[in-house]
């Protein structure tokens, strides 16, 4: 019979510039226990309101550029925001984070994330200098049978 696994870890991401940054490999490095999973879910949650998580194409870097440009057009710094006490990039960052979201759930099967061929997990950094970002990783499911 397979064992049930529940695991929760926090990880810190180094500060990054504004834009979209592929973090799939960092998540996998932080979770070596993933290789023990037969079937399960990985829940990824960011503990910030001015950055977000998303899954998108991981092959062409132009996708990251276009995502940033599109979100900047939707939530420009030039909009007459009321909340301005933390600088001109803060409120647009909150809008972008709300549009994309603070969490993702990714299926796990036979020790791997079930991402599509061209999918990767991204940190959306919506501030010029957002600083280090903290992420909570919660892994649940059944372990692989003993051989």
Image (tube, grey):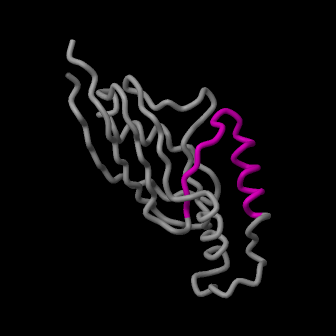
In the picture, measured across the screen, residue 121 lies left or right of residue 62, that is left
The quadrant in which residue 116 appears is top right
Q: Is residue 146 above or below residue 96?
A: above
Q: Position of residue 15 (x, y in %)?
A: 49, 59
Residue shown at the point (43%, 49%) measured from the top left: 44
Which residue sits furthest front?
1
Q: Position of residue 124 (x, y in %)?
A: 59, 55
What is the quadrant of the N terminus in the image?
top left
Q: Residue 62: say if magenta.
A: yes
Report the label total. 0
Nearest the viewer among 6 and 74 is 6
What is the quadrant of the C terminus in the image?
top left
Q: Which residues are magenta?
A: 51-72
Q: Is residue 50 above or below residue 20?
A: below
Nearest the viewer among 25 and 110 is 110
Residue shown at the point (36%, 52%) measured from the top left: 11
Q: Position of residue 60 (x, y in %)?
A: 71, 35
Q: Residue 14: say if magenta.
A: no
Residue shown at the point (35%, 41%) measured from the top left: 30
Q: Position of residue 138 (x, y in %)?
A: 34, 47
Nearest the viewer among 77 and 14 is 77
Which residue sits furthest top?
147
In the picture, measured across the screen, residue 3 lies left or right of residue 54, that is left
Residue shown at the point (60%, 67%) measured from the top left: 127
Q: Is residue 127 above or below residue 139?
A: below
The quadrant in which residue 14 appears is bottom left
In the picture, measured across the screen, residue 53 lies left or right of residue 43, that is right
């Amino acid at each position: 019979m397979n064992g049930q696994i529940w695991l929760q870890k926090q990880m810190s991401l180094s500060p990054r510039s504004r834009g979209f940054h592929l973090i799939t490999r960092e998540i996998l490095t932080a979770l070596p226990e993933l290789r023990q999973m037969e079937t399960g879910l990985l829940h990824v949650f960011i503990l910030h309101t001015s950055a977000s998580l998303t899954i998108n194409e991981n092959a062409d870097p132009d996708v990251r550029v276009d995502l940033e440009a599109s979100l900047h057009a939707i939530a420009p710094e030039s909009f007459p925001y009321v909340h301005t006490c933390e600088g001109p990039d803060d409120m647009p960052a909150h809008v972008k984070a709300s549009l994309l979201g603070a969490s993702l759930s990714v299926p796990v099967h036979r020790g791997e994330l079930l991402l599509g061929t061209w999918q990767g997990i991204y940190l959306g950094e919506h501030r010029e200098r957002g600083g280090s970002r903290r992420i909570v990783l919660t892994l649940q499911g059944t372990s692989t049978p003993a051989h």
